[in-house]
Every structure is written in structure tokens, then in C-alpha cells.
Image (cartoon, rainbow, N blue to C red):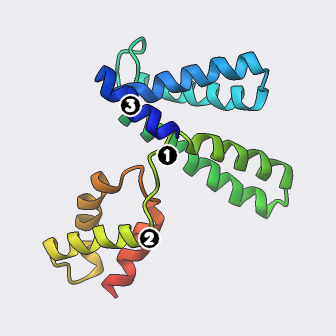
Amino acid sequence: MLKNIINLEINKKGCESMLYETISRDMIQAMKAKDKETLSTLRLLKSAIDLYKINNKLDRNADASDEIVIDVVVKQVKTHKESIEEFKKANRQDLIDSLEKEITLLSKYLPEQMSTEKITEEIDKVFDKLKPTNVKEMGLIMKELAPILKGKADMKVVNSIIQEKLK
């Protein structure tokens, strides 16, 4: 439903930064509801977005485009998943549960994830176009797929499917 609202708002305003505004609104709602976990996660996300803008010499006072927000959210989710793996090794279920809640919250701001079938479909299209013959051409394939699948698919899954096809 959130994605539908975002799409409607973009169509009405023609605005690029609806996700950033949505995060701000959700942050205000979390403050009003005194939801400390959600508020903390959203504050971390906004600060990560601001850091991205600073590092890339963008105007910090301007809203971030949806593309920037998606990039940052994808990186945050990836980092959280890596942390979960480390916490599993250390047997820290409390931290694992906390990070899984954060991943669920952050995932609201990502585009709908593609199914494995659709990912394979896109990979097949690129394979038809490039006609790769060995694993050395993996970089070319990923370069072609990255803009298409960015934020819509887990690149680890994409990578494993490509490697399987190249065998």
C-alpha cells in the first residue's frame, strides 16, 4: 500500500524525493507514537542519507532523490544482513531479532523485490544480447544488469544465477 501511495504522490506532484518525505513523515509519526525502535531506525537511515549526500558533495539541505534513498536503504539492509551472520556465530539472538525488525522496517522503503523467475528472465535477456562464453565476462554481465535490477533484487542471488548459467 505504501508503494501505491508513493506512486500516486509522485504522479500528482512530479516530485523525485517522495521516499525521503515519507521517511520524514514516518519519523514524525514514530515520535508522536513514542515508538523508540522505529524512530531510532529512521534517524539512522536519515543520517546515512545525509552522509551519502555529504560524501558525494550534494546539497545537504535539499531532499534526496528516490534513487539515493534506495541506494542507501539497500546498503543498510546489506550491512544488517552481514551483521546478522556475525551475531549468529556469536549466538546473540537478541541482536539478531533487533536487526531483523530493522530490516523489515527498512524494506518498506525499497521497491518490490523481483522473483527469481523475473531475475532469471532479465539475465536471459542480457545473455542473449552479450552471448557470454566464460566466467571472465561476469563483469560485463553485471554492468549490464546492475541498472535494471538495482534495488529490486539481491545481487548475491543474481550473481549465483549468472555463475550457474556460465558453467
- Tag 3 residue: 8
Is 114 placed above or below 166 here? above
Q: Residues within 10 Å of mark 2 (few under 14, many from 20)?
A: some
Say whether disc 3 or disc 2 marks the residue closer to the N-terminus: 3
Is 128 placed above or below 14 here? below
Q: Closer to the camera: disc 3 or disc 2?
A: 3
Residue 55 position, x and y percent, is 41, 27
- Tag 1 residue: 74
Say whether disc 1 or disc 3 marks the residue closer to the N-terminus: 3
Secondary structure, mark 1, is helix
Q: Closer to the camera: disc 1 or disc 3?
A: 3
**Distance in Å between CA atoms under marks 2 and 1:** 18 Å
**Distance in Å between CA atoms under marks 1 and 3:** 23 Å
- Tag 2 residue: 116
Residue 25 position, x and y percent, is 57, 20
Task: From the viewer's perspective, tell me whether residue 139 is left or right of residue 158.
Answer: left
Q: Closer to the camera: disc 2 or disc 1?
A: 2
- Farthest bottom residue in view: 167
The amino acid type of the residue labelled 3 equals Leu
Q: Do tag 2 and tag 1 residues touch (Cβ < 8 Å)?
A: no
Q: Do tag 1 and tag 3 residues touch (Cβ < 8 Å)?
A: no
- Residue drawn at 36 percent across, 68 percent down: 118
Secondary structure, mark 3, is helix
**Distance in Å between CA atoms under marks 3 and 2:** 28 Å
